[in-house]
Amino acid sequence: MASLFSKTITLRNDLKITDKEFFQLRDFIYEQSGIYINDNRKYLLENRLINRLKELNLKSFGEYYYFLKYDPGRKQELNRLFEVITTNETSFYRNPPQLKVFQDIILKEVLDKQRAKGQKKLHIWSAGCSTGEEPYTISMILHEVLKLEINSWQIKITANDLSEGVLRSARRGVYSQYSLRTTPKEIIAKYFIDEGNGKYRVKPEVKKLVSFGQLNLSDRFQVKRVERSHIIFCRNVIIYFDDEMKKNVIASFYDNLLPGGYLFIGHSESLHNISRAFKPIHYPGAIVYKKEG
Ligand SMILES: C[S@@+](CC[C@H](N)C(=O)[O-])C[C@H]1O[C@@H](n2cnc3c(N)ncnc32)[C@H](O)[C@@H]1O
């Protein structure tokens, strides 16, 4: 596999990234996004950036680094860079056991608490939402749980990502069957319009609850401006950060959550050695992190 991969690179380009260029770009990417690229992913970075260098007619990765730092168009290029380096793998109803805990236990508790306070208001934050499958899934679950009562609630799902490219697809809300691979059939029938060409469009009532916007989790000022949340989803995102960045991001989620709020992270991720502020609660198939209060 490794030899096949390196062969593809040799055939596709004559530009090579030197160690110095790799470290410069790696540090720059880390400063800008908190995404940490390991030494063993040097060729992956080379492979992902090579076409961009060709489009810009640049002769080396060093020139690309200077372009990113000093060119008048550097802000736009930074967005292109984010699109190239991020991993956007996602799907509707990703990790069903975790979503079952969300639907049957956590959401029910949070909604009951709000009803008891006479405040039919709910804010959920999907941080690192990629092409939108996660926040739309949350919206569908809310429709399933609240049914007609949903009309008497003020609900907002804030969905953010670093990459403008994925946000464009998210706002469009049109998906292939592959994105629906773990979605129950009755949910597909209820919340999607089958466009007939293998494409499925999310229904307007699902879209209505979700607001998309670009946000960089490594920018604490941007993060501070997010409305306080009852529940945060940040699944399969911190896996790309180093420990320092993970600690900062998780601390900012703690600050953002309202007392009694919950954090969901990816099932292969852990807060071990990252934060002791949350109370981990173990359910079959999921650990949920609670901000007590
Ligand atoms: C693998 S996807 C996860 C999508 C979804 N949460 C899920 O679990 O299916 C990771 C997403 O995190 C985003 N991301 C990475 N670094 C980020 C940052 N610093 N700020 C905001 N989003 C970031 C990426 O652009 C990507 O879309």
Image (tube, rainbow, N blue to C red):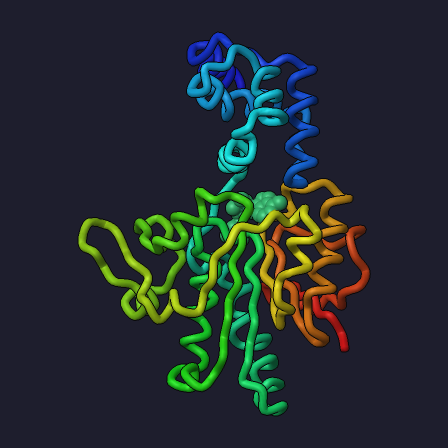
- Whether residue 186 appears in this view of the structure is yes
Question: Residue at point 67% right, 48% down?
Answer: 219
Vertical order, 109 against 257 (above or below): below
Q: Position of residue 222 (x, y in %)?
A: 64, 53
For this view, does 125 lie left or right of residue 55?
right
- The residue sitting at the front extreme is 72
Question: Residue at point 56% right, 12% down?
Answer: 60
Q: Position of residue 40 (x, y in %)?
A: 65, 24
Relative to the observer, which residue lies in front, 221 or 198? 221
For this view, does 191 lie left or right of residue 50?
left
Relative to the observer, which residue lies in front, 258 or 281? 258
Relative to the observer, which residue lies in front, 147 or 100? 147
- The residue sitting at the left extreme is 196
Vertical order, 254 against 246 (above or below): below
Question: Residue at point 38% right, 85% down?
Answer: 148
For this view, does 148 lie left or right of residue 49?
left
Instruction: Find residue 292 and report its image quarter.
Output: bottom right
Vertical order, 97 against 26 (above or below): below
Question: Residue at point 42% right, 57% down?
Answer: 92
- The residue sitting at the top extreme is 14
Vertical order, 214 against 44 (above or below): below
The tally of labels here is 0
Q: Position of residue 175 (x, y in %)?
A: 33, 51
On-image quarter of the C terminus: bottom right
- Whether residue 283 appears in this view of the structure is no
Relative to the observer, which residue lies in front, 282 or 189? 189
Q: Position of residue 272 (x, y in %)?
A: 77, 53
